[in-house]
Amino acid sequence: MSAPYAKLPAWADYGLIPLVNLVVAFIVAGLVVLLVGENPFRAAVILVEGAFGRGQGIAYTLYYATTFIFTGLSVAVAVHCGLFNIGTEGQAYIGGLGVAIVCLAFDSLLPWWLTFPLAILGAAAMGALWALIPAWLQARRGSHIVITTIMFNFIAASIMVYLLVGPLKPLASQAPQTRLFLDGGQLPKLNWLIELFGGKVRAAPFNVSFLLALFMAWLMWVLIWRTRLGYEMRTYGFSPKAARYAGISETRIIIVTMMISGALAGMMALNPTMGDQHNVAIDFVNGAGFVGIAVALMGRSHPLGIVLAAVLFGMLYQGGAELSFEMPNISRDMIVIIQGLVILFAGALEHMFRPSIQTLFATLSPKSAGLAVNGEGA
Amino acid sequence: MDVFIAAVQTLDSTVRLSVPLLLACLAGLYSERAGIFDIGLEGKMLVGAFAGATAAAVFHSALIGIGMAILVSTAFAMIHGFASITHRGNQIVSGVAINFIAAGSTVILGQAWFHQGGRTPALSAAERFPSIVLPGAAAVRDVPILGPIYSTLISGHSVLVYLAFLTVPFTWWVLYRTRFGLRLRAVGENPAAVDTAGISVAWLRYRALMCTGVLTGVAGAYLSMVQNGGFVKDMTAGKGYIALAALIFAKWKPVNAMFACLLFGFLEALSIRLQGTPLPIIGRVSAQVMQALPYVLTVVLLAGFIGKAIPPKAGGVPYVKER
Amino acid sequence: MHQAAIELIGINKSFGAVHANRDINLEVRRGTVHGIIGENGAGKSTLMSILYGFYQADSGEIRVNGEPTAIRTSNDAIAAGIGMVHQHFMLVENFSVLENVILGAEGAPLLKTSIAKARSELRRLESEYGLEVDPDAIVEELPVGLQQRVEILKALYRGAEILILDEPTGVLTPAEADHLFRILGQLKEQGKTVVLITHKLREIMAITDTVSVMRQGTMVATRRTTETTVEELAELMVGRRVLLRVVKDAAEAGAVKLSVKNLSVKDQRGVTMVDDVSFDLRAGEIVGIAGVAGNGQSELLETIAGSRHAASGTVILDGMPVDLTGAADPGELRRRGLAHVPEDRHHVGLVLAFEENQNAILGYHRQRRYLKGPLLNIEAILADAKDRIEKYDIRPADCRLKTANFSGGNQQKIVLAREMEQDPDVLIVGQPTRGVDVGAIEFIHKRLIAMRDAGKAVLLVSVELDEIRSLSDRILVMFDGRIVGERGSDASEGELGLLMAGVEQREAAE
């Protein structure tokens, strides 16, 4: 039995505690900034301004956020079924193969709005396929899915390197990447959306896959809380024994969930390839799969939380890029630290502050408790 | 004879390449045998490598270097302990976090302190660990067969190499012949039994993680102070994960771990050796196949098609006293 | 020397809102066997865990041999000469007996000397108390009775003068239990003090010198065993006269609804758990399966309900065979009119993290009434949940409340409501009243009788022999995976007890 504490109101549970965790993560990150001899407050200002100060920054922030919504959803879907899919990185990478196949085959034949749905299917199918094997191994052979998906990340990397220095590379080229996609394989930008609100965007890769990401977030909400499949996933996630009792096939639910998770991961590939670089290049995922873990943790596996957390990380990526211009001591690796700290405090240490916050709520009367804690968090 | 020399040289580099794997693998063994999953081996090795190279460069001493590597790596292990033992956090999540923090901070601090794009200054011979030439190595060099084996394969390695291989019997001895080992194995199987026997589960697991920290520190120091003359960004390059794979492959047993690491080291050595050279019958083997092989083998083992890897029973589960 | 081995004075312990121990005073005299009796959840185990340093009391004092003793950890308890045999054994299963015994009491940092010392010490204990066990055997390969012996050895090896046993006979056959009692008798003769926690009155009468009764976290009485009766203790335990017999008419058994033929079940290790079991279950009767826990009843129940594969045999439900080999599917069985109240409601019958209404459809979530296409029909689910809360008097009456926040009795009612309201032809029920308060027990028993009277076939598995006897029309006794006898509802406790111990079977084999 878990230790029964005073119950917290929902806003504290879903709002305050993640906020406190996040604040602590940033305080520690600030200490690192201090350690390299820069002013953390100035760094924070540059970061936020770089991300949201101008239309250009906002467009980039949302471009990065798009990627992280996909990977965050991918991790979160699996979490609801009690599975830790650490293989989002590899599934997204292999998803790029799906994009490459579709685009290389059809970009000269079809307009983008026909290639795009095909590429979505291709990316999702390849991502799902890459999740299928670890899922099957977990379901039928009991192989720990965390370990197998880690292994599959490396195997995916080897396969993609092999393909991108070999069969997928144009003969004349030296760079390990596919040829550039033609117009039919390029997604239209959404920068006009920001300009609509008065922002100015020179050139940014913010594109229609953002809308797909939002749609997927909504779809995930429906899936988890409004469908029979989602009900079965949650049942299995909370109690595999209860799921067996309820006639839910363990094999089926693990495989289906992981394939959905893999498909979402695979769709991530659309954004940087069709939306930005217009090719599939080596290492294009660049850790986004792991950011998905941070995003899912931060967003408490709820689609709305994930979208917000993805925007936060998009901000870090975009603002971080600005920061590295302004402060040469702080390269973009700073984001990696922050990411790690967020995963640490919002994930592994998520309960560290809970007892003290609960004590606070218990000792103060409910009304003043709300105020006092708000004051402390600020 | 050329083939023979090539074989000896390949085995020699197998030994060199498997050392960091072996140290990290044994590090993971202490932690996982105590019931704490550790996918943060990679990160701890990385900070160890960075701290070692940095301290060695600054203080001009290999010993201070390795000491610092051990210290910092252990500190990271303690963070893992703080999250997963004291606060009963998710061990996988904590491991992932540590890998990120390590990857980011080594580069940021390296760049801030040395301004060489995340590298640390190149280490001089005095700041690195010298190779040990075993007695008579030069004398027997020309003896056929045994000569090259002794002088190349057995002699001439860094002291850390010998240390790493001595850690194998030592770990076995600790695990199966000491009180600490008995308790360590017990806490990974049934922490409640350890608790009711009047032993602190948390302190025991913290001590296991200290062993992990020390060994990953040495592994990191080997990378930056023996294999390479300084720290380079992301120099572990997935070795922590291969070590994890080797640990599973070894079914969490020390002697098996040595063979698993030698096998994975051999695959790496072979892929370097064979770059571009076609093999008889098979033809040209792509480097990626060799790189992926350890992972594929581990997955096959995990799938239970060749034997079965059964992890310590309490692994990954935070210990909570039950009512 | 002080007469009392243990004195507990004013012990209080709360877990959140639950006041598990309230102002407990207890005196255990040296060299006696002292029983502590009470229902599930009366606070016995909590009290003993405090004594063993597993929990800390919120207030109160512990005296050992008259000395006030602070017991903060199990180590303190061990140092004070207290040993404990837990209900769930605290053994490392892949360790040898010897390794388990020395764990935590190794002495030197190297094992060599401690193992040698332990080996000779074990030999001494073995001869002194009749505790034979192979020191090099791997614990998981030993039968339960021997594993328990290892636990006792562990305590004695640490020099325990006071031995606490928490529900030691729950997993034992009567023969094994008798052997245990002989061992306890020997321990007493050697001057050791034994505290026996149980909810079985018979054991108390058989072995203890003194008995203390706990009810709802308080200590209600202490008696000399010779000066009390089973009836008095039972009344003290539950707080009012126990309704030993449920009022019911004779059964009017109808057609065979469920027929089990030559069913065998193996567990994951390949050990036969159910061995060639055959019986029929008819409409309008309750068939009870009696047996000591772990004799295959649970596996039998799960197999019939489709949650477990059978090794061989057939089950015929309403004249149609059930596929037991490949894809056993509980959902399919539910559609065919078989409802199942599982033994473990916390992990199997309910998802405690769900809202109550989500649990009200568990297993029936594929019924068309709860669906709109692939979507859940939330209104229909809520409406049904509210309806059942009212019908079964589930409290609090809030179908949006998290299931974990309901009491044990109300949780069990949620499961029963779900299964009974499906109007099944066959209802199979495991441990319907385990951890359920007295009021809910009566309610549940009446409901089961009502099901029977409505012409349903009910299969009841319970380790509470009283429950089996008061509800069943026919009683099957399981021992070692087999059905070793069938008796009518008028069978005596002694007769059933002998069957449960496998006595007749052993005679037949000789």
Image: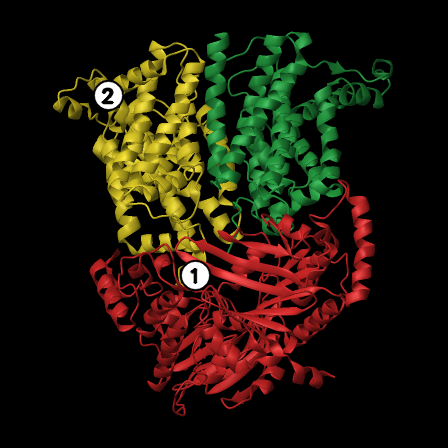
- In the displayed structure, C199 sits above or below B208; it is below
Q: Which residue is mark 1?
A: C346
Host chain of mark 1: C
The circle on residue A52 is 2
Callout 1 touching callout 2 (CB < 8 Å): no
The chain letter for the residue carrying disc 2 is A
Residue at image location 44% in from the left, 26% down from the top: A164
Quick check: B190 above or below C24? above
Q: Quick one: SS at disc 1? A: helix
Q: Secondary structure at mark 2?
A: helix
Q: Position of residue C269 (x, y in %)?
A: 61, 61
Quadrant (top left/top right/bottom left/bottom right) for the C terminus of chain A: top left
Q: Which one is in front, A372 or A229?
A: A372
Q: In the figure, what tint was chain C given?
A: red
Residue C18 shown left or right of residue C115 in the figure: left
Report which colour depicts chain A.
yellow
For residue C389, which quarter of the picture?
bottom left
| Disc nearest the viewer among 1 and 2 | 1
Left or right side of C61 for A342: left
